[in-house]
Image (spheres, coloured by chain):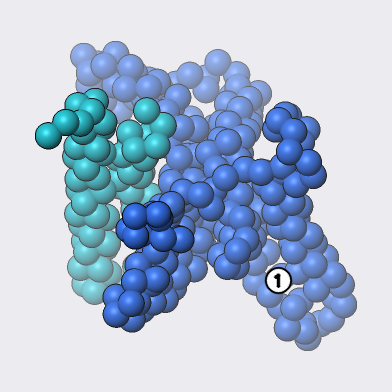
Amino acid sequence: MAESKDGGLVFKPMDQFKVDSLFGDGPIGMFTITNVTLWMALAVIAIVLVMVVGARGRNIVPSRSQSIAEMIYGFVHNMVRDVAGKDALPYFPYIMTLFLFILFANFLGLIPGSFTTTSHIAVTAVMAVAVFLTVTIVGFVKNGTAFLSLFWVSSAPLALRPILAVIEVISYFVRPVSHSIRLAGNVMAGHAVIKVFAAFAAGGIIAVPAILGITAMYGLEVLVSAIQAYVFTILTCVYLKDALHPHH
Amino acid sequence: MEGNVAEMGQFIGAGLAAIGSGAAAIGVGNVAGNFLAGALRNPSAAGGQTATLFIGIAFAEALGIFAFLVSLLLMFAV
């Protein structure tokens, strides 16, 4: 947030989302190591530290780190069972993976100066499309063509059913779009707002309310990080329930 | 007064798209307020419905995020 040549403040709230190559200045290709790669790897390392190393003791009376791991595990396990049903429990590892990765990537992104990988639609779209493909394949494997009854609302009057079928098909295919943009948009919006406040913090007397604003937004962002990880996984559970029990 | 009309339209459009974020705020407030009203009438049933609450909030919020995205696209991508 430096001052420009003619004295005015320069707002560059989106610069924090720039993808840069870590080694060298070459063009960014598919296998270039970028800061996105680095922070995704750090998220995985953090998950391993908490879930594997932290819970290694397997004590009856858990230590602090072990009880954190157990709480996260129990939380996601209960979510899958309550929302998607008991027969969705074979898919629990996948949902647990999604939840942990999003949660840790969001929280790591809150460290000042770090890079938020989940603010990129490219990252979240991969996860959302993976969920979409998984759910569609599971639906067809488990139910065969009966899965298509998801689009045929048998509880509605017969005349309305074709119209509803069109709407259901559209809303089914919009799922990966809204699923990915919800997470990326929420995270990106919060971080951009913090940067906008940070630009005001350089402006003399305005700095006091600006820093208060940063503090408040940061608190909100911690909340949003956890809630968006929760929302992403709970929507995965809802989609999975639709795939396992397509009948309305 | 000279200027780029297309750029002006871009910024006006971005501002108009930001109205959608406010509309989404109304929607999310509606969901949460109605949940609270129901939860206070029947507190024992409220605990089991938090998942539904968050799903409702997520769906209402998605459209606001779409508006935000349109505004961002107009500002930086077009």
Percent x, y of residue A6: 34, 55
Tag 1 subunit: A
Image quadrant where one finds the N terminus of chain A = bottom left
Outermost residue on the right side: it is A57
* Left or right of residue A197, residue A32 in this image: right
Q: Chain B is shown in which shade?
A: cyan
Nearest the camera: A72 or B52?
A: A72
Q: Going 41% across and 32% down the picture, which residue do you hit?
A: B77
Type of amino acid under label 1: Glu
**Would you place residue A247 above or below residue A118 in this image?**
above
**Would you place residue A100 above or below residue A22 in this image?**
below
Outermost residue on the left side: it is B1
* Left or right of residue A98, residue B41 in this image: left
Nearest the camera: A215 or A219?
A: A215
Percent x, y of residue A80: 58, 52
Image quadrant where one finds the C terminus of chain A = top left
Q: Going 49% across and 32% down the picture, which residue do you hit?
A: A176
Q: Going 19% across and 37% down the picture, which residue do you hit?
A: B12
Nearest the camera: A139 or A216?
A: A216
Examine the rendering and report whether any part of residue B61 can be seen: yes
Q: Which residue is mark 1?
A: A70
Percent x, y of residue B35: 26, 63
Q: Going 62% across and 61% down the picture, which residue do you hit?
A: A114
Q: Chain A is shown in which shade?
A: blue
* Left or right of residue B2, residue A219 in this image: right
* Left or right of residue A168, residue B15 in this image: left
Q: Secondary structure at mark 1?
A: helix
**Would you place residue A114 above or below residue B40 in this image?**
above
